[in-house]
Amino acid sequence: MIELPDANILPLSLEHNFWTWSAQKRISPIPVTRAEGVYFWDVDGKKYLDFNSMVMCVNIGHGNEKVIDAICDQVRELPFAGPGFATRPRAILGEKLAEIVPEELSRFLYTTGGADANENAVKLARAYTGKHKILTRYRSYHGATYGAIALTGDPRRLAWEPAVMPGVVHFWGPYRYRSTFHMDLPEVDDERLRRDYLNHLEEVIQYEGAETIAAVMIETVTGTNGILVPPDGYLQGLRDICNRNGILLITDEVMSGFGRTGKWFAVEHWNVVPDIMTMAKGLTSGYAPLGAVAMKQEIADTFKDKVFEGGLTYNGHPISLAAASAVIEVMQQEQLVERSHQTGLFLKKKLEELMSRHPSVGDVRSIGLFGAIELVKNRETREPLAPYAGTSQPMVALRKYLLEKGVFLYTHWNVVLLIPPLIISEEQLNEGISIIDEALSITDNAVE
Ligand code: PLP
């Protein structure tokens, strides 16, 4: 490795590099040097509890020796082969993925991450159906490349409009706490949520024309936009609407996949099989970049005789494929999906306790180790503690306190996300939750 004193990491990083999702003048990255399990350390030796699995991806935890060995072995055997080659890691991963995804999804197209997985899913759906429109939901994130940002239903799209992928139409999905269609109902039951949001979708399809719509694409459980778990029956209803209208169902499991929700993939909670499913993040637990598009055989067959006009230099990079297979093995050996479910029950209980103690907590939501705390100024009016697409002094103070105390997590406007590695113990979870508990006194003081 090229030598560089720890003290130079931050200043030199700031000198020449351009940073994403940031105003360059305001960037203040943590200079990280080492990570192990659910923790990482900065150059000063300060320890952080990783409540965001870095970027919601290190599902198996940091520094797993089995995955590191698999990567090193692959580098020694064959560090690179072009996407058109058959390689050992490619042969192995296809088989491993087929074991864990819903049975009908039997073909896998590899990509470099989640955004291009979603863009390829769109290409496949358009080619298979011969139709062009894609319906996606408001309050969704599908990636930052030009096509994927067009699919996205949150303000991250607005900076790049006109978004260049034509034919994307957004619709509303169920968000119980702030249900667009039920503003006058403080509590809305599953049945009503399911019915009204499915009716809304049917109406959108009617106006757009089923004969023009290739696919509906959804995050099975919405991630950054607040851990929005669909009501029971919603996904089944969506599947049924798609079937009746000759529309494909694409589920984006980039964040909700690989055990995050207590199942391998979130669709399993509702026994729904999509036609196409995208994945990334947890696929390699962040040990190497990789995404994948899982599809039904009949969709792959569109290209039996016709050429699939698509590909990138690093589709199916051997190092990433080897990392993915090793990650799946680790997850199976350590039963991390079951563990996510079990520890998730503990997380749910802890979140409810926080809600009972803190007036600034308007709502808590979780499924597996995918949790959120929604903060409000006023529980009656549900006024958010930070405005839509913005922040506020109490949210900034909350984040600052947590970071000072060594809890690393992601906040989205007025929502705090809890997305730790699946290996986290109840004790470690408690360690972070007690610091969040202290920190919430800051937001409680802002309650009106
Ligand atoms: N889809 C979802 C649900 C995501 O959360 C993300 C990333 O956060 C993406 C797609 C894009 O993935 P990537 O950043 O690997 O392109």
Image (cartoon, rainbow, N blue to C red):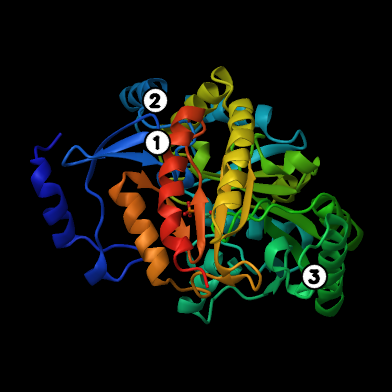
Task: Give the x, y percent position of residue 164.
Answer: 54, 76
Cα–Cα span, label 2 and label 3: 48 Å
Q: Position of residue 186 (x, y in %)?
A: 76, 67
Circles 2 and 1: CB atoms closer than 8 Å: yes
Residue matched to label 1: 287
- Find disc 3 in the rendering and name its residue: 185
Image coordinates for residue 386, horizontal then vertical, percent: 48, 71
Classify mark 3 as within 8 Å of ligand 1 or not, answering yes or no. no
Mark 1: few, some, or many residues within 10 Å (few <14, many ≥20)? many
Give the spatial CA distance, label 2 vs label 1: 9 Å
Which part of the image, by quadrant, shows the N terminus?
A: top left
| Residue plotted at (43% across, 56% down) | 441
Q: Which residue is mark 2?
A: 64
> Which is nearer the eye, 377 or 51?
377
Which residue is depicted at the point 31% across and 46% down?
Answer: 405
Which element is circle 3 on?
loop
Which quadrant of the figure has residue 50? top left
Dividing the picture into quadrants, the one containing residue 53 is top left
Image position, residue 432 (x, y; %): 43, 40
Going by the numbered disc 1, the residue's amino acid type is Tyr
Tell us which disc is closer to us: 1 or 3.
3
